[in-house]
C-alpha cells in the first residue's frame, strides 16, 4: 500500500491486487463475537514515515488514521515477578534500570549513543536506498564496519550492560522483526533510537484501520484495488514482465509489476513460467528464513487496567530458548510470550466491559519443525493460556468468551509464506542490503520487490522504507506509464 500510494501520488496509474478478502496482507484482522483481533503488526513506530505518504500530496494522515500513543512502550516481566517498564521517558527509564542494576545507567547512556550512531548510518542514510550492485554495499561497508555491524545485537548490548535481565530488555527487539538477538547484526540496535525518538503508537480500531486509511487515501488519489483475487502468474516476454493473471481468470498487461508477496512465492510460483523464477528460487532455498509464530487470540470478560498494551513475559531461558527456535528446531517446554492487550489503550476493539488479547510465541519454521499443527495447536494453546493465567489472570479459562489460534500452517496457507516463516529472510548481516532480495530484479528489468523480503527488511519502518526505495526506482524507470 505504501508503494501504491507513492506511485499514484506521482501520477502513475496503479492497481493493487490483493489475494485475501481484505487488504493488508499480514495486516489482516478478524471480527469475532464483537471483538476485533489484529493479525499484526501491532507495534507502530516511525510515524513520520507513514505521514510522509499523505504529505506527498499535501494531505493529512490524521483525517484517515487516528494514532494513539502507547505508554509504557512495553512492560517486561520475568518468572521471578520482576517488572521493567520500558519507554522514552528518560528519567523514568533511568529509575527502572537502577532498580535492577544502578551501574547500568551509565552503560545504557553509552549504548544509547551507539544506537544513535547506527540509526544514522543504517536507517537515515541506508534505510530507503536500494542496493542493486555489490559496489553500493562496498561503499557503505566502512561506516558499518566502524559500527561493528558484524557483531550481534546481544553482543553489543552486553558490551555496555552488565545485568542479564537488562541485556534481554535491550536486545529482544530483533525478535519483533524475525531475528535472533544472538545473530542479528548490531545495526538493528537502531530500533532503540527509532522508538526513543518517534515513540510507540497504536491506530485506533487496530492496525487494520491504518490499512483502511491507506486504502482510502490511495483510492482518493485514483488508485484501483482488486481484492480477494490471488495472483497466480506474472507472465514474462524475454526479460520483461508483461501480464498479471489471477485465480479468477482476470488478466491485464502492465508496464511494470511489483510484488510484496513472500519472496520465495514470488519467484518459485508467480514467476514459474520464466527461467529467472526457477533459478532464483533455487538460490533462495539455500538461504536462512526467519522463524514462524504461534498466536492465541482471545477475548475475556472484564477490563485489565493493570496489564499494559504490550508485555513481554520472559521464560526461564533466553539464549537457550532462542537456540531451540533458530538452530535446534524443537518445540521447547518453556517459552517467552509477547502479550498484546489493545483494549487498555483503545476500548473500541472489544465489547463494553471486555478485553481483547493475543499471546504470541515464536516457534521454528516448518522447515526445521515439521509438526502436525492441527494436532499440536490445541495443546500449545492451553499451555500458553495457562502461563498467562499463572502470571496475570488467574481465572483466565473461566473468563474467555472467544478464542482461536494462528499457526505456522496458517502462515503457509493464507500468506503463501515459505515454510510458514513470519518475517521472510532472516535479518542477518549476510542477508542484508545487496545480499537480500533486490528492490528491482537483476534479470526481469521491470519486476520489483517491496516488503519484508527485500531491503531493508521486516517491521513497519522496514517495509515502508522498502516502498520508498522501490518507488524511486520505478518512477525513474517508468515516467508516467502504468504500474501494478
Image: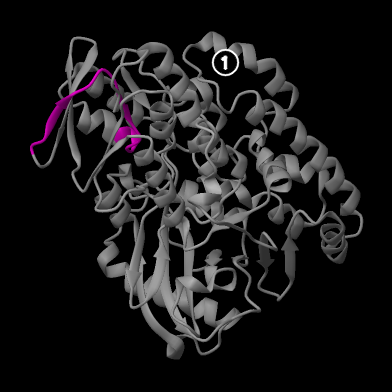
Quick check: can you spot residue 46? no
The residue indicated by pointer 1 is: 137
Residue 221 location (% of width, % of height): 38, 35
Q: Please name the residue shown 29% across and 26% down the image.
A: 282
Residue 359 location (% of width, % of height): 48, 68
Secondary structure at badge 1 equals helix
Q: Please name the residue shown 67% across and 59% down the image.
A: 73
Within the magenta stretch, is there residue 265?
no
Within the magenta stretch, is there residue 254?
yes
Residue 210 location (% of width, % of height): 46, 51
The structure's colour scheme is one colour
Camera-side residue: 192 or 184? 192
Q: Which residues are magenta?
A: 249-264
Q: Please name the residue shown 64% across and 53% down the image.
A: 200
Q: Does residue 332 appear left or right of residue 43 in this picture?
A: left
Q: Does residue 181 appear left or right of residue 131 in this picture?
A: right
Quadrant in the picture for the N terminus = top left
Camera-side residue: 90 or 227? 227
Q: Please name the residue shown 40% across and 26% down the image.
A: 7
Q: How many marks?
A: 1
Quick check: can you spot residue 81? yes
Residue 436 location (% of width, % of height): 46, 26
Amino acid at each position: 500500500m505504501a508503494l501504491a500510494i507513492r506511485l499514484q501520488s506521482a501520477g502513475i496509474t496503479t492497481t493493487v491486487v490483493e489475494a485475501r478478502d481484505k487488504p493488508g496482507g499480514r495486516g489482516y484482522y478478524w471480527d469475532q463475537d464483537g471483538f476485533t483481533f489484529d493479525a499484526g503488526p501491532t507495534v507502530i513506530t516511525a510515524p513520520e514515515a507513514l505521514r510522509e505518504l499523505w504529505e506527498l500530496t499535501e494531505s493529512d494522515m490524521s483525517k484517515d488514521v487516528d494514532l494513539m500513543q502507547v505508554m509504557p512502550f512495553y512492560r517486561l516481566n520475568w518468572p521471578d515477578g520482576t517488572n521493567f517498564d520500558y519507554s522514552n521517558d528518560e528519567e523514568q527509564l533511568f529509575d527502572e534500570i537502577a532498580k535492577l542494576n544502578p551501574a547500568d545507567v551509565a552503560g545504557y547512556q553509552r549504548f544509547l549513543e551507539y544506537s544513535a550512531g547506527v540509526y544514522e548510518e543504517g536507517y537515515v542514510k541506508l534505510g530507503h536506498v536500494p542496493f542493486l550492485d555489490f559496489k553500493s554495499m562496498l561503499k557503505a561497508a566502512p561506516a558499518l564496519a566502524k559500527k561493528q555491524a558484524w557483531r550481534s545485537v546481544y553482543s553489543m548490548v552486553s558490551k555496555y550492560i552488565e545485568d542479564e535481565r537488562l541485556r534481554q530488555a535491550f536486545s529482544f527487539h530483533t525478535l519483533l522483526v524475525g531475528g535472533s538477538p544472538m545473530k542479528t547484526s548490531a545495526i538493528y540496535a537502531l530500533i532503540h533510537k527509532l522508538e526513543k525518538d518517534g515513540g510507540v503508537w497504536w491506530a485506533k480500531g487496530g492496525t487494520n484501520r491504518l490499512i483502511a486509511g491507506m486504502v482510502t487515501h490511495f483510492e482518493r488519489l485514483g488508485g484501483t484495488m482488486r481484492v480477494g483475487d490471488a495472483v497466480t502468474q506474472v507472465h514474462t516476454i524475454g526479460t520483461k514482465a508483461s501480464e498479471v493473471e489471477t485465480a479468477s481468470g482476470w488478466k491485464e498487461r502492465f508496464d511494470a509489476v511489483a510484488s510484496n508477496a513472500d519472496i520465495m512465492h514470488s519467484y518459485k510460483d508467480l514467476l514459474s513460467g520464466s527461467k529467472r523464477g526457477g533459478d532464483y528460487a533455487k538460490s533462495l532455498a539455500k538461504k536462512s528464513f526467519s522463524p514462524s509464530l504461534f498466536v492465541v487470540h482471545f477475548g475475556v470478560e472484564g477490563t485489565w487496567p493493570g496489564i499494559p498494551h504490550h508485555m513481554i513475559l520472559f521464560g526461564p531461558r533466553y539464549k537457550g530458548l532462542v537456540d531451540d527456535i533458530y538452530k535446534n528446531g524443537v518445540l521447547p517446554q518453556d517459552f517467552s510470550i509477547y502479550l498484546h492487550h489493545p483494549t487498555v489503550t483503545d476500548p473500541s476493539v472489544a465489547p463494553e466491559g471486555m478485553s481483547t488479547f493475543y499471546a504470541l510465541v515464536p516457534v521454528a519454521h516448518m522447515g526445521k519443525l515439521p509438526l502436525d499443527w492441527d494436532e499440536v495447536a490445541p495443546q500449545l494453546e492451553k499451555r500458553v493460556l495457562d502461563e498467562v493465567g499463572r502470571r496475570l489472570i488467574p481465572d483466565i479459562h473461566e473468563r474467555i468468551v472467544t478464542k482461536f489460534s494462528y499457526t505456522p500452517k496458517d502462515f503457509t496457507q493464507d500468506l503463501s509464506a515459505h515454510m510458514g516463516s513470519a518475517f521472510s529472510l532472516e535479518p542477518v548481516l549476510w542477508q542484508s542490503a545487496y545480499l537480500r532480495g533486490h528492490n528491482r530484479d537483476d534479470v526481469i528489468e521491470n519486476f520489483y520487490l517491496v516488503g519484508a523480503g527485500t531491503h531493508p527488511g521486516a517491521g513497519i519502518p522496514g517495509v515502508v522504507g522498502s516502498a520508498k526505495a522501490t518507488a524511486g526506482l520505478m518512477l525513474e524507470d517508468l515516467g508516467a506509464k502504468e504500474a501494478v
